[in-house]
Amino acid sequence: MTEDDDVRGLKTQIEPCIWDINPISTKVSDKTKIHIISEVATEEDNETFHKILETGLSSENATDNYSINYRFLKTM
């Protein structure tokens, strides 16, 4: 999938809400420093969610909602 200016602009706006951003380059500096923690999800669900955010990957066999929804959104 190629990124157009709109997609790059949207990512630039969303990334600081999810991860730490390098103030000079405005790029994600470390995908392990995640700002989102769900207070209603289980610890296991939060770990799954964070792993997806860190790696951009989800196991094809995973049946949790975060993995299912992530794989669905990637097909769009």
Image (cartoon, helix red, strand yellow):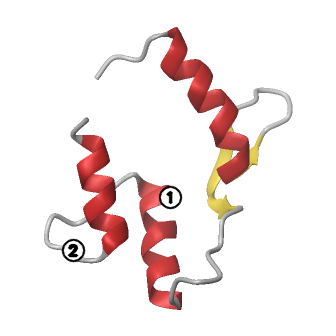
Left-right relation of 42 to 37: left
The kind of residue tagged 2 is Ala
Please determine whether, in this image, residue 6 is positioned above or below residue 59: above
Residue 21 pos. (x, y %): 75, 42
Left-right relation of 34 to 63: right
Question: Which label number is shown at residue 68?
Answer: none
Residue 38 pos. (x, y %): 61, 75
Question: Which label number is shown at residue 62?
Answer: 2
Query: What residue is rendered at 58% in x and 84% in y?
Result: 40
Q: Residue 29 sits in which quadrant?
A: top right
| Residue that mark 1 sits on | 54
Mark 1 crowdedness (10 Å alpha carbons): few <14, some 14-19, many ≥20: some
Nearer the observer, 44 or 32: 44
- Of the 4 image quadrants, the one containing the N terminus is top left
The kind of residue tagged 1 is Glu
Which sits earlier in the primary sequence, circle 1 or circle 2?
A: 1
Mark 2 crowdedness (10 Å alpha carbons): few <14, some 14-19, many ≥20: few
Query: What residue is rendered at 21% in x and 74% in y?
Result: 62
Nearer the observer, 40 or 53: 40
Q: Nearer the viewer, mark 1 or mark 2?
A: 2
Residue 28 pos. (x, y %): 66, 41
Query: What residue is rendered at 71% in x and 48% in y?
Result: 17
- Of the 4 image quadrants, the one containing the C terminus is top left
